[in-house]
Image (cartoon, rainbow, N blue to C red):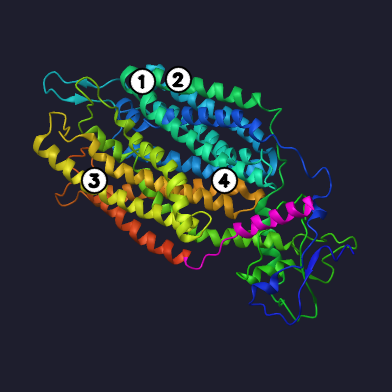
Amino acid sequence: MAREKCFSNLSSDESSESSDALLPEKDDHLDLLDSSSAIQTKPGWKAMPYILANESIEKMATYGLTTNFMVYLVRKYHMDQVSAANILNIWTCGYSLLTVVGASVADFYLGKFLTIALASLATLVGMVTITLTAFVPQLRPPPCFIDGQQHLEHCISNTKTQLGFLLVGLSWLAIGTGGIRPCSIPFGIDQFDSTTVEGRKSVLSYFNWYYTSSTVVMLINQTLVIYIQDSVSWAWGFSIPTLLMSCAIALFLAGSKIYHQVKPEGSTYVSFAQVLVAAYKKRHLKLHDEERVLGVFSDVSLDGNVVLSKLPLTAQLSSLKKAALVVDDDLKDDGSCANPWRLCSIQQVEEVICFMKILPIWASGGICFMTYAQEGTFVVSQALKMDRHIGPNFQMPAGSIKMMSLITLCICLPFYDRVLQPALKKITKHENGITTLQRIGLGYLFSILFAAVAGLVEQQRRASALSHASADGVASMSVFWLFPQLMFLGLFELFGVVGHIELYNKEFPEKMRSIANSLFYLCVAGGTYLSTLAVSIVYRVTGKHGQPNWLGNDINAGRLDYFYFLIAALGVLNFVYLWSCARGYTYNYKANVNVVETIQTDILV
Protein backbone atom coordinates (compact mmCIF):
# COMPACT_ATOMS: atom_id res chain seq x y z
CA MET A 1 0.00 0.00 0.00
CA ALA A 2 2.84 2.37 0.74
CA ARG A 3 4.20 1.95 -2.76
CA GLU A 4 0.77 2.47 -4.33
CA LYS A 5 0.56 5.97 -2.88
CA CYS A 6 3.97 6.91 -4.25
CA PHE A 7 3.41 6.64 -7.97
CA SER A 8 0.87 6.89 -10.74
CA ASN A 9 0.00 4.00 -13.06
CA LEU A 10 0.45 4.20 -16.81
CA SER A 11 -1.16 1.90 -19.34
CA SER A 12 1.37 0.08 -21.47
CA ASP A 13 -0.51 0.80 -24.69
CA GLU A 14 -0.62 4.57 -24.24
CA SER A 15 1.40 6.73 -26.60
CA SER A 16 4.26 8.69 -25.12
CA GLU A 17 3.39 11.60 -27.38
CA SER A 18 0.08 12.24 -25.63
CA SER A 19 -0.06 14.40 -22.57
CA ASP A 20 -2.94 12.27 -21.30
CA ALA A 21 -0.55 9.34 -21.10
CA LEU A 22 1.45 11.21 -18.51
CA LEU A 23 -1.46 12.07 -16.24
CA PRO A 24 -1.50 10.37 -12.85
CA GLU A 25 -4.47 8.64 -11.36
CA LYS A 26 -6.43 10.89 -9.04
CA ASP A 27 -4.66 10.84 -5.69
CA ASP A 28 -6.32 11.55 -2.42
CA HIS A 29 -5.03 15.10 -1.92
CA LEU A 30 -6.41 15.04 1.59
CA ASP A 31 -3.54 12.73 2.52
CA LEU A 32 -1.42 15.85 2.30
CA LEU A 33 -3.85 18.13 4.09
CA ASP A 34 -5.83 16.04 6.59
CA SER A 35 -3.60 16.71 9.55
CA SER A 36 -4.58 19.69 11.63
CA SER A 37 -0.99 20.88 11.66
CA ALA A 38 -1.04 21.30 7.89
CA ILE A 39 -3.78 23.93 8.01
CA GLN A 40 -2.54 26.98 9.86
CA THR A 41 -4.27 30.23 10.56
CA LYS A 42 -2.57 33.04 8.69
CA PRO A 43 -2.78 36.70 9.71
CA GLY A 44 -3.90 37.95 6.29
CA TRP A 45 -4.54 41.68 6.24
CA LYS A 46 -3.53 42.05 9.90
CA ALA A 47 0.11 41.84 8.83
CA MET A 48 -0.27 44.15 5.84
CA PRO A 49 0.09 47.52 7.64
CA TYR A 50 3.56 46.46 8.77
CA ILE A 51 4.62 44.87 5.48
CA LEU A 52 3.22 47.49 3.09
CA ALA A 53 4.34 50.41 5.27
CA ASN A 54 7.84 48.93 5.57
CA GLU A 55 7.98 48.24 1.83
CA SER A 56 6.77 51.75 0.97
CA ILE A 57 9.20 53.49 3.33
CA GLU A 58 12.08 51.25 2.15
CA LYS A 59 11.34 52.15 -1.48
CA MET A 60 11.03 55.83 -0.58
CA ALA A 61 14.43 55.59 1.11
CA THR A 62 16.35 53.69 -1.58
CA TYR A 63 14.71 55.38 -4.57
CA GLY A 64 15.01 58.75 -2.85
CA LEU A 65 18.75 58.18 -2.60
CA THR A 66 19.31 56.84 -6.13
CA THR A 67 16.66 58.50 -8.35
CA ASN A 68 18.63 61.74 -8.68
CA PHE A 69 22.03 60.06 -8.37
CA MET A 70 22.99 60.72 -11.98
CA VAL A 71 22.84 64.46 -11.28
CA TYR A 72 24.81 64.00 -8.03
CA LEU A 73 27.65 62.17 -9.81
CA VAL A 74 27.85 64.77 -12.57
CA ARG A 75 27.64 67.86 -10.35
CA LYS A 76 29.46 66.79 -7.20
CA TYR A 77 31.88 64.10 -8.46
CA HIS A 78 32.51 65.90 -11.79
CA MET A 79 31.93 62.79 -13.88
CA ASP A 80 31.06 62.87 -17.54
CA GLN A 81 27.58 61.58 -18.34
CA VAL A 82 28.85 58.29 -19.86
CA SER A 83 30.85 57.38 -16.73
CA ALA A 84 27.97 58.36 -14.45
CA ALA A 85 25.48 56.37 -16.55
CA ASN A 86 27.75 53.32 -16.53
CA ILE A 87 28.16 53.44 -12.73
CA LEU A 88 24.39 53.60 -12.28
CA ASN A 89 23.81 50.81 -14.81
CA ILE A 90 26.46 48.59 -13.20
CA TRP A 91 24.97 49.22 -9.76
CA THR A 92 21.48 48.35 -11.01
CA CYS A 93 22.85 45.26 -12.71
CA GLY A 94 24.72 44.31 -9.53
CA TYR A 95 21.77 44.46 -7.15
CA SER A 96 19.60 42.70 -9.72
CA LEU A 97 22.08 39.81 -9.87
CA LEU A 98 22.25 39.75 -6.08
CA THR A 99 18.50 39.14 -5.93
CA VAL A 100 19.28 35.54 -6.94
CA VAL A 101 21.58 35.27 -3.93
CA GLY A 102 18.98 36.89 -1.69
CA ALA A 103 16.23 34.57 -2.91
CA SER A 104 18.48 31.53 -2.45
CA VAL A 105 19.48 32.51 1.09
CA ALA A 106 15.82 33.09 1.99
CA ASP A 107 14.58 29.79 0.52
CA PHE A 108 17.47 27.59 1.63
CA TYR A 109 18.72 28.90 4.98
CA LEU A 110 17.27 31.95 6.73
CA GLY A 111 13.67 32.30 5.60
CA LYS A 112 12.14 35.45 4.13
CA PHE A 113 11.65 37.36 7.40
CA LEU A 114 15.24 37.12 8.61
CA THR A 115 16.60 37.76 5.11
CA ILE A 116 14.56 40.98 4.79
CA ALA A 117 15.61 42.10 8.27
CA LEU A 118 19.35 41.57 7.67
CA ALA A 119 19.17 43.01 4.16
CA SER A 120 17.47 46.12 5.54
CA LEU A 121 20.40 46.64 7.92
CA ALA A 122 22.83 46.31 5.00
CA THR A 123 20.78 48.87 3.08
CA LEU A 124 20.96 51.26 6.04
CA VAL A 125 24.76 50.90 6.20
CA GLY A 126 25.02 51.74 2.50
CA MET A 127 22.73 54.76 2.84
CA VAL A 128 24.68 56.13 5.81
CA THR A 129 27.92 55.74 3.83
CA ILE A 130 26.54 57.62 0.81
CA THR A 131 25.02 60.31 3.03
CA LEU A 132 28.46 60.91 4.56
CA THR A 133 29.81 61.80 1.09
CA ALA A 134 27.36 64.71 1.02
CA PHE A 135 28.17 65.84 4.59
CA VAL A 136 31.97 65.50 4.64
CA PRO A 137 33.72 67.69 2.00
CA GLN A 138 36.87 65.53 2.06
CA LEU A 139 34.87 62.56 0.73
CA ARG A 140 34.08 64.28 -2.60
CA PRO A 141 35.97 66.53 -5.04
CA PRO A 142 36.12 70.29 -4.33
CA PRO A 143 33.67 72.56 -6.17
CA CYS A 144 34.51 73.73 -9.67
CA PHE A 145 36.01 77.20 -10.05
CA ILE A 146 36.18 79.80 -12.82
CA ASP A 147 39.55 80.73 -14.31
CA GLY A 148 39.79 84.52 -14.00
CA GLN A 149 41.86 84.96 -17.15
CA GLN A 150 40.26 82.54 -19.60
CA HIS A 151 36.83 82.55 -17.94
CA LEU A 152 36.68 78.76 -18.18
CA GLU A 153 35.26 76.42 -15.58
CA HIS A 154 37.83 74.03 -14.11
CA CYS A 155 36.75 70.93 -12.20
CA ILE A 156 39.01 68.56 -10.27
CA SER A 157 38.09 64.93 -10.75
CA ASN A 158 37.52 62.58 -7.82
CA THR A 159 40.40 60.68 -6.23
CA LYS A 160 40.54 56.89 -5.97
CA THR A 161 39.81 57.14 -2.23
CA GLN A 162 36.76 59.33 -2.77
CA LEU A 163 35.42 57.09 -5.53
CA GLY A 164 36.21 53.98 -3.49
CA PHE A 165 34.26 55.28 -0.47
CA LEU A 166 31.28 56.02 -2.71
CA LEU A 167 31.43 52.56 -4.31
CA VAL A 168 31.57 50.92 -0.86
CA GLY A 169 28.30 52.64 -0.01
CA LEU A 170 26.74 51.57 -3.31
CA SER A 171 27.94 47.99 -2.71
CA TRP A 172 26.26 47.78 0.70
CA LEU A 173 23.14 49.28 -0.82
CA ALA A 174 23.21 46.66 -3.59
CA ILE A 175 23.58 43.83 -1.05
CA GLY A 176 20.61 45.07 0.94
CA THR A 177 18.43 45.71 -2.07
CA GLY A 178 19.30 42.27 -3.45
CA GLY A 179 17.96 40.69 -0.27
CA ILE A 180 14.79 42.76 0.09
CA ARG A 181 13.39 42.89 -3.45
CA PRO A 182 12.96 39.14 -4.22
CA CYS A 183 11.46 38.40 -0.79
CA SER A 184 9.04 41.29 -0.23
CA ILE A 185 6.23 40.13 -2.55
CA PRO A 186 6.44 36.40 -1.58
CA PHE A 187 6.56 37.31 2.12
CA GLY A 188 3.33 39.28 1.73
CA ILE A 189 1.69 36.39 -0.17
CA ASP A 190 2.71 34.01 2.65
CA GLN A 191 0.37 35.89 5.00
CA PHE A 192 -2.72 34.76 3.05
CA ASP A 193 -4.32 31.33 2.79
CA SER A 194 -4.12 30.52 -0.91
CA THR A 195 -6.26 27.38 -0.51
CA THR A 196 -9.40 29.52 -0.12
CA VAL A 197 -11.22 31.70 -2.63
CA GLU A 198 -11.06 34.65 -0.25
CA GLY A 199 -7.34 34.13 0.21
CA ARG A 200 -6.66 34.17 -3.51
CA LYS A 201 -8.73 37.35 -3.91
CA SER A 202 -6.70 38.92 -1.11
CA VAL A 203 -3.47 38.00 -2.90
CA LEU A 204 -4.66 39.81 -6.04
CA SER A 205 -5.66 42.80 -3.92
CA TYR A 206 -2.25 42.70 -2.27
CA PHE A 207 -0.57 42.94 -5.69
CA ASN A 208 -2.65 46.04 -6.47
CA TRP A 209 -1.85 47.68 -3.15
CA TYR A 210 1.82 46.79 -3.50
CA TYR A 211 2.18 48.36 -6.91
CA THR A 212 -0.01 51.37 -6.02
CA SER A 213 2.05 52.15 -2.93
CA SER A 214 5.25 51.85 -4.97
CA THR A 215 3.93 54.31 -7.55
CA VAL A 216 2.86 56.85 -4.91
CA VAL A 217 6.26 56.58 -3.25
CA MET A 218 8.02 57.19 -6.54
CA LEU A 219 5.90 60.29 -7.13
CA ILE A 220 6.90 61.66 -3.72
CA ASN A 221 10.54 60.97 -4.52
CA GLN A 222 10.29 62.65 -7.91
CA THR A 223 8.87 65.82 -6.38
CA LEU A 224 9.66 66.45 -2.72
CA VAL A 225 12.91 64.51 -2.19
CA ILE A 226 14.53 65.59 -5.46
CA TYR A 227 13.48 69.20 -4.86
CA ILE A 228 15.25 69.12 -1.49
CA GLN A 229 18.38 67.62 -3.09
CA ASP A 230 18.49 70.18 -5.89
CA SER A 231 17.23 73.32 -4.15
CA VAL A 232 18.11 72.89 -0.45
CA SER A 233 21.14 70.62 -0.10
CA TRP A 234 22.33 67.15 -1.04
CA ALA A 235 23.12 66.46 2.61
CA TRP A 236 19.51 66.96 3.68
CA GLY A 237 18.28 65.24 0.53
CA PHE A 238 20.21 62.11 1.48
CA SER A 239 19.61 62.35 5.24
CA ILE A 240 15.83 62.20 4.96
CA PRO A 241 15.78 58.85 3.05
CA THR A 242 18.35 57.45 5.51
CA LEU A 243 16.20 58.40 8.52
CA LEU A 244 13.15 56.90 6.79
CA MET A 245 15.04 53.64 6.30
CA SER A 246 15.70 53.48 10.04
CA CYS A 247 11.96 53.89 10.65
CA ALA A 248 11.17 51.18 8.08
CA ILE A 249 13.38 48.65 9.89
CA ALA A 250 11.76 49.42 13.24
CA LEU A 251 8.28 49.12 11.74
CA PHE A 252 9.06 45.81 10.06
CA LEU A 253 10.44 44.28 13.27
CA ALA A 254 7.40 45.52 15.22
CA GLY A 255 5.19 43.05 13.38
CA SER A 256 7.44 40.03 13.94
CA LYS A 257 4.96 38.34 16.31
CA ILE A 258 2.12 38.67 13.79
CA TYR A 259 3.82 37.37 10.65
CA HIS A 260 3.34 33.88 9.33
CA GLN A 261 6.89 32.70 8.66
CA VAL A 262 7.42 29.85 6.21
CA LYS A 263 10.40 27.67 7.05
CA PRO A 264 13.12 27.26 4.40
CA GLU A 265 12.40 24.22 2.22
CA GLY A 266 15.83 23.45 0.84
CA SER A 267 17.63 24.25 -2.37
CA THR A 268 15.62 24.49 -5.57
CA TYR A 269 18.92 24.33 -7.44
CA VAL A 270 19.71 20.97 -5.83
CA SER A 271 16.25 19.74 -6.84
CA PHE A 272 16.90 20.86 -10.43
CA ALA A 273 20.28 19.14 -10.41
CA GLN A 274 18.72 15.92 -9.08
CA VAL A 275 16.23 15.88 -11.97
CA LEU A 276 18.97 16.37 -14.57
CA VAL A 277 21.23 13.73 -13.00
CA ALA A 278 18.40 11.20 -12.57
CA ALA A 279 17.20 11.76 -16.16
CA TYR A 280 20.76 11.26 -17.43
CA LYS A 281 21.17 8.02 -15.47
CA LYS A 282 17.91 6.71 -16.97
CA ARG A 283 18.47 8.12 -20.45
CA HIS A 284 18.49 4.64 -22.01
CA LEU A 285 15.07 3.74 -20.59
CA LYS A 286 11.81 4.13 -22.46
CA LEU A 287 8.74 5.67 -20.93
CA HIS A 288 6.70 2.56 -21.81
CA ASP A 289 7.08 -1.15 -22.56
CA GLU A 290 10.40 -1.57 -20.80
CA GLU A 291 10.85 -4.66 -18.64
CA ARG A 292 12.87 -2.90 -15.98
CA VAL A 293 10.33 -0.08 -15.72
CA LEU A 294 7.41 -0.60 -13.35
CA GLY A 295 5.32 1.69 -15.59
CA VAL A 296 4.88 4.36 -12.93
CA PHE A 297 5.94 7.90 -12.10
CA SER A 298 6.92 8.78 -8.57
CA ASP A 299 4.30 11.24 -7.29
CA VAL A 300 5.23 12.09 -3.71
CA SER A 301 6.68 15.13 -1.99
CA LEU A 302 10.18 13.87 -1.28
CA ASP A 303 10.82 16.51 1.37
CA GLY A 304 7.63 15.71 3.27
CA ASN A 305 6.23 19.23 3.02
CA VAL A 306 2.55 20.00 2.47
CA VAL A 307 1.67 20.37 -1.22
CA LEU A 308 -1.01 23.02 -1.78
CA SER A 309 -1.05 22.80 -5.56
CA LYS A 310 0.52 20.88 -8.39
CA LEU A 311 1.78 21.87 -11.78
CA PRO A 312 -0.06 20.18 -14.66
CA LEU A 313 1.65 17.31 -16.41
CA THR A 314 2.86 18.28 -19.85
CA ALA A 315 4.04 16.46 -22.95
CA GLN A 316 7.04 18.78 -23.40
CA LEU A 317 10.61 17.68 -22.71
CA SER A 318 9.42 14.12 -22.09
CA SER A 319 13.02 12.87 -21.77
CA LEU A 320 13.25 14.63 -18.40
CA LYS A 321 10.28 12.61 -17.14
CA LYS A 322 12.50 9.54 -17.05
CA ALA A 323 13.85 10.97 -13.80
CA ALA A 324 10.49 10.10 -12.20
CA LEU A 325 10.28 6.53 -13.53
CA VAL A 326 10.36 3.96 -10.74
CA VAL A 327 12.74 1.12 -11.58
CA ASP A 328 14.42 -1.72 -9.69
CA ASP A 329 15.10 -0.68 -6.09
CA ASP A 330 14.30 3.04 -6.37
CA LEU A 331 11.82 2.75 -3.49
CA LYS A 332 12.34 1.50 0.04
CA ASP A 333 9.89 -0.89 1.69
CA ASP A 334 8.03 2.00 3.30
CA GLY A 335 7.54 3.65 -0.12
CA SER A 336 10.08 6.44 0.38
CA CYS A 337 12.74 7.29 -2.15
CA ALA A 338 15.97 5.35 -1.79
CA ASN A 339 18.21 7.78 -3.71
CA PRO A 340 16.98 11.31 -4.65
CA TRP A 341 19.74 11.51 -7.28
CA ARG A 342 18.21 8.54 -9.09
CA LEU A 343 14.48 9.00 -8.49
CA CYS A 344 12.64 12.33 -8.43
CA SER A 345 8.96 13.14 -8.06
CA ILE A 346 7.04 14.04 -11.20
CA GLN A 347 6.43 17.47 -9.67
CA GLN A 348 10.16 18.05 -9.41
CA VAL A 349 10.40 17.25 -13.11
CA GLU A 350 7.53 19.59 -13.97
CA GLU A 351 9.20 22.40 -12.02
CA VAL A 352 12.31 22.04 -14.18
CA ILE A 353 10.16 21.96 -17.33
CA CYS A 354 8.26 25.04 -16.14
CA PHE A 355 11.54 26.89 -15.62
CA MET A 356 12.91 25.86 -19.03
CA LYS A 357 9.65 26.89 -20.76
CA ILE A 358 9.86 30.41 -19.32
CA LEU A 359 13.56 30.93 -20.10
CA PRO A 360 13.03 32.00 -23.76
CA ILE A 361 10.37 34.54 -22.66
CA TRP A 362 12.62 35.74 -19.86
CA ALA A 363 15.56 36.16 -22.27
CA SER A 364 13.53 38.61 -24.35
CA GLY A 365 13.36 40.98 -21.39
CA GLY A 366 17.01 42.01 -21.65
CA ILE A 367 16.73 44.14 -24.80
CA CYS A 368 13.29 45.42 -23.81
CA PHE A 369 14.55 46.67 -20.45
CA MET A 370 17.28 48.64 -22.21
CA THR A 371 14.66 51.35 -22.69
CA TYR A 372 13.91 51.28 -18.96
CA ALA A 373 17.58 52.00 -18.24
CA GLN A 374 17.53 55.26 -20.24
CA GLU A 375 15.03 56.99 -17.96
CA GLY A 376 17.51 57.71 -15.19
CA THR A 377 20.43 58.50 -17.49
CA PHE A 378 20.05 60.08 -20.92
CA VAL A 379 16.48 61.26 -20.38
CA VAL A 380 17.81 63.25 -17.42
CA SER A 381 20.60 64.56 -19.67
CA GLN A 382 17.95 65.76 -22.12
CA ALA A 383 16.04 67.48 -19.33
CA LEU A 384 19.18 69.28 -18.15
CA LYS A 385 19.44 70.97 -21.57
CA MET A 386 15.77 72.00 -21.83
CA ASP A 387 13.66 74.79 -20.34
CA ARG A 388 12.43 73.37 -17.02
CA HIS A 389 10.66 76.48 -15.74
CA ILE A 390 7.12 76.19 -14.44
CA GLY A 391 6.11 79.79 -14.08
CA PRO A 392 8.60 82.63 -13.59
CA ASN A 393 10.02 81.54 -10.21
CA PHE A 394 10.10 77.73 -10.16
CA GLN A 395 12.37 75.38 -12.09
CA MET A 396 11.68 71.64 -12.15
CA PRO A 397 14.66 69.51 -11.04
CA ALA A 398 15.95 67.42 -13.94
CA GLY A 399 15.71 64.24 -11.87
CA SER A 400 11.97 64.80 -11.36
CA ILE A 401 11.29 64.17 -15.04
CA LYS A 402 10.35 60.56 -14.23
CA MET A 403 7.16 61.74 -12.58
CA MET A 404 5.67 62.13 -16.07
CA SER A 405 5.76 58.36 -16.58
CA LEU A 406 4.52 57.79 -13.03
CA ILE A 407 1.54 60.11 -13.57
CA THR A 408 0.72 58.13 -16.71
CA LEU A 409 0.92 54.93 -14.68
CA CYS A 410 -1.28 56.33 -11.87
CA ILE A 411 -3.98 57.32 -14.39
CA CYS A 412 -3.83 54.26 -16.65
CA LEU A 413 -3.50 51.56 -13.97
CA PRO A 414 -6.98 52.06 -12.42
CA PHE A 415 -8.45 52.70 -15.87
CA TYR A 416 -7.06 49.40 -17.14
CA ASP A 417 -8.16 47.52 -14.02
CA ARG A 418 -11.67 48.98 -13.74
CA VAL A 419 -12.67 49.85 -17.32
CA LEU A 420 -10.48 48.36 -20.04
CA GLN A 421 -9.93 44.89 -18.55
CA PRO A 422 -13.67 44.19 -17.89
CA ALA A 423 -14.47 45.38 -21.43
CA LEU A 424 -11.83 43.06 -22.86
CA LYS A 425 -13.24 40.16 -20.84
CA LYS A 426 -16.57 40.51 -22.60
CA ILE A 427 -14.88 40.53 -26.01
CA THR A 428 -12.19 37.86 -25.58
CA LYS A 429 -13.98 35.70 -22.95
CA HIS A 430 -10.63 35.46 -21.17
CA GLU A 431 -10.60 35.82 -17.38
CA ASN A 432 -7.95 38.57 -17.56
CA GLY A 433 -9.15 40.18 -20.77
CA ILE A 434 -5.88 39.35 -22.51
CA THR A 435 -3.30 36.67 -21.82
CA THR A 436 -0.16 37.44 -19.85
CA LEU A 437 2.05 37.09 -22.93
CA GLN A 438 -0.23 39.43 -24.90
CA ARG A 439 0.17 41.95 -22.09
CA ILE A 440 3.95 41.59 -22.24
CA GLY A 441 3.85 41.96 -26.04
CA LEU A 442 1.92 45.23 -25.73
CA GLY A 443 4.53 46.44 -23.27
CA TYR A 444 7.27 45.66 -25.78
CA LEU A 445 5.46 47.68 -28.45
CA PHE A 446 5.24 50.66 -26.09
CA SER A 447 8.98 50.37 -25.36
CA ILE A 448 9.67 50.59 -29.11
CA LEU A 449 7.43 53.66 -29.35
CA PHE A 450 9.30 55.22 -26.42
CA ALA A 451 12.67 54.88 -28.17
CA ALA A 452 11.33 56.07 -31.55
CA VAL A 453 9.55 59.12 -30.11
CA ALA A 454 12.55 59.91 -27.88
CA GLY A 455 14.75 60.02 -30.97
CA LEU A 456 12.37 62.36 -32.79
CA VAL A 457 12.06 64.69 -29.78
CA GLU A 458 15.83 64.72 -29.34
CA GLN A 459 16.25 65.79 -32.97
CA GLN A 460 14.00 68.79 -32.34
CA ARG A 461 15.66 69.60 -29.00
CA ARG A 462 19.13 69.49 -30.54
CA ALA A 463 18.07 71.69 -33.45
CA SER A 464 16.54 74.18 -31.01
CA ALA A 465 19.68 74.16 -28.84
CA LEU A 466 21.99 74.78 -31.79
CA SER A 467 19.90 77.64 -33.13
CA HIS A 468 18.47 79.32 -30.02
CA ALA A 469 20.51 78.00 -27.11
CA SER A 470 21.49 80.11 -24.12
CA ALA A 471 25.09 80.51 -22.98
CA ASP A 472 24.95 77.23 -21.02
CA GLY A 473 23.58 75.29 -24.02
CA VAL A 474 20.02 75.02 -22.70
CA ALA A 475 17.45 74.91 -25.50
CA SER A 476 14.39 77.13 -25.44
CA MET A 477 12.28 74.02 -25.94
CA SER A 478 10.08 73.15 -22.92
CA VAL A 479 10.90 70.03 -20.93
CA PHE A 480 7.26 68.97 -21.30
CA TRP A 481 8.09 67.89 -24.85
CA LEU A 482 9.55 64.82 -23.14
CA PHE A 483 6.07 63.85 -21.94
CA PRO A 484 5.10 61.76 -25.06
CA GLN A 485 8.11 59.46 -24.75
CA LEU A 486 7.69 59.17 -20.98
CA MET A 487 3.99 58.43 -21.45
CA PHE A 488 4.96 55.43 -23.59
CA LEU A 489 7.48 54.43 -20.94
CA GLY A 490 4.70 54.49 -18.31
CA LEU A 491 2.55 52.30 -20.55
CA PHE A 492 5.49 49.94 -20.99
CA GLU A 493 5.67 49.65 -17.21
CA LEU A 494 1.92 49.01 -16.98
CA PHE A 495 1.97 46.22 -19.55
CA GLY A 496 5.54 44.96 -19.92
CA VAL A 497 6.93 45.23 -16.38
CA VAL A 498 3.74 44.14 -14.58
CA GLY A 499 3.27 41.43 -17.23
CA HIS A 500 6.65 39.90 -16.43
CA ILE A 501 5.95 39.95 -12.68
CA GLU A 502 2.50 38.42 -13.26
CA LEU A 503 3.91 35.67 -15.50
CA TYR A 504 6.55 34.55 -13.01
CA ASN A 505 4.26 34.59 -9.99
CA LYS A 506 1.43 32.72 -11.75
CA GLU A 507 3.50 30.13 -13.56
CA PHE A 508 5.86 29.03 -10.78
CA PRO A 509 4.71 26.97 -7.75
CA GLU A 510 4.69 28.41 -4.23
CA LYS A 511 8.10 27.23 -3.11
CA MET A 512 9.75 28.89 -6.13
CA ARG A 513 8.22 32.35 -5.71
CA SER A 514 11.40 33.99 -4.44
CA ILE A 515 13.32 32.54 -7.37
CA ALA A 516 10.50 33.67 -9.68
CA ASN A 517 10.74 37.27 -8.45
CA SER A 518 14.52 37.21 -8.81
CA LEU A 519 14.01 36.37 -12.51
CA PHE A 520 12.36 39.76 -12.97
CA TYR A 521 15.33 41.55 -11.48
CA LEU A 522 17.65 39.47 -13.66
CA CYS A 523 15.71 40.92 -16.60
CA VAL A 524 16.47 44.38 -15.24
CA ALA A 525 20.12 43.36 -14.81
CA GLY A 526 20.25 42.10 -18.39
CA GLY A 527 18.72 45.34 -19.66
CA THR A 528 21.12 47.57 -17.74
CA TYR A 529 24.12 45.45 -18.70
CA LEU A 530 23.15 45.55 -22.38
CA SER A 531 22.58 49.30 -22.06
CA THR A 532 26.06 49.74 -20.55
CA LEU A 533 27.55 47.57 -23.28
CA ALA A 534 25.73 49.49 -26.01
CA VAL A 535 26.78 52.85 -24.54
CA SER A 536 30.42 51.75 -24.35
CA ILE A 537 30.45 50.37 -27.92
CA VAL A 538 28.71 53.42 -29.39
CA TYR A 539 31.02 55.76 -27.49
CA ARG A 540 34.12 54.00 -28.85
CA VAL A 541 32.93 53.45 -32.42
CA THR A 542 31.38 56.86 -33.15
CA GLY A 543 33.22 60.17 -33.19
CA LYS A 544 35.81 59.13 -35.76
CA HIS A 545 36.80 60.80 -39.04
CA GLY A 546 35.68 64.21 -37.83
CA GLN A 547 32.14 63.07 -37.01
CA PRO A 548 30.58 63.98 -33.61
CA ASN A 549 30.48 61.29 -30.95
CA TRP A 550 26.88 60.20 -30.47
CA LEU A 551 27.22 60.17 -26.68
CA GLY A 552 29.78 62.89 -26.04
CA ASN A 553 29.81 65.06 -22.93
CA ASP A 554 28.17 67.87 -24.87
CA ILE A 555 24.73 66.50 -25.66
CA ASN A 556 24.16 69.29 -28.17
CA ALA A 557 27.21 68.27 -30.20
CA GLY A 558 26.39 64.55 -29.95
CA ARG A 559 23.72 62.49 -31.67
CA LEU A 560 21.69 60.97 -28.86
CA ASP A 561 18.79 60.65 -31.30
CA TYR A 562 20.73 58.07 -33.31
CA PHE A 563 21.26 56.04 -30.12
CA TYR A 564 17.52 56.07 -29.43
CA PHE A 565 16.79 54.89 -32.99
CA LEU A 566 19.29 52.07 -32.49
CA ILE A 567 17.41 50.93 -29.38
CA ALA A 568 14.12 51.09 -31.29
CA ALA A 569 15.53 48.87 -34.06
CA LEU A 570 16.74 46.32 -31.51
CA GLY A 571 13.29 46.46 -29.90
CA VAL A 572 11.61 45.53 -33.19
CA LEU A 573 13.85 42.47 -33.59
CA ASN A 574 13.20 41.53 -29.96
CA PHE A 575 9.42 41.79 -30.46
CA VAL A 576 9.62 39.36 -33.40
CA TYR A 577 11.59 36.98 -31.17
CA LEU A 578 9.00 37.23 -28.38
CA TRP A 579 6.18 36.57 -30.87
CA SER A 580 7.91 33.41 -32.12
CA CYS A 581 8.43 32.15 -28.53
CA ALA A 582 4.86 32.94 -27.44
CA ARG A 583 3.19 31.05 -30.29
CA GLY A 584 3.87 27.61 -28.82
CA TYR A 585 3.70 28.51 -25.13
CA THR A 586 1.22 26.70 -22.86
CA TYR A 587 0.27 28.12 -19.45
CA ASN A 588 0.60 26.30 -16.14
CA TYR A 589 -1.27 28.51 -13.70
CA LYS A 590 -4.83 27.56 -14.73
CA ALA A 591 -4.30 23.91 -13.92
CA ASN A 592 -2.45 24.91 -10.80
CA VAL A 593 -5.45 26.88 -9.53
CA ASN A 594 -7.87 24.11 -10.43
CA VAL A 595 -5.98 21.64 -8.24
CA VAL A 596 -6.18 24.02 -5.29
CA GLU A 597 -9.91 24.48 -5.81
CA THR A 598 -10.37 20.68 -5.95
CA ILE A 599 -8.56 20.30 -2.65
CA GLN A 600 -10.71 23.01 -1.06
CA THR A 601 -13.93 21.40 -2.32
CA ASP A 602 -12.90 18.00 -0.97
CA ILE A 603 -12.18 19.50 2.44
CA LEU A 604 -15.58 21.19 2.57
CA VAL A 605 -17.35 17.97 1.56
4 or 3: tag closer to the N-terminus = 4
Residue at left 50%, top 60%?
429
201 lies above or below 254: below
Residues at discs 2 and 1 in contact (Cβ within 8 Å): yes
Position in image of residue 117 (x %, y %): 62, 30
Q: Residue 560: which disc?
A: 3
In space, the residues marked 2 and 3 are separated at their CA atoms by: 34 Å
In space, the residues marked 2 and 4 are separated at their CA atoms by: 29 Å
2 or 1: tag closer to the N-terminus = 1
Q: Residue 228: which disc?
A: 1
2 or 3: tag closer to the N-terminus = 2
Q: Quadrant of residue 490?
A: top left
Q: Secondary structure at mark 4?
A: helix
Where are the magenta residues, as a range?
A: 583-605
Q: Secondary structure at mark 2?
A: helix
**Residue 427 within the segment the image draws in magenta:** no
Residue at left 33%, top 36%?
404
Name the residue carrying label 2.
240
148 lies above or below 445: above
2 or 4: tag closer to the N-terminus = 4
546 lies above or below 241: below
Name the residue carrying label 4.
100
Q: Quadrant of the N terminus?
A: bottom right
In space, the residues marked 1 and 3 are separated at their CA atoms by: 29 Å
Q: Residue 90: which disc?
A: none
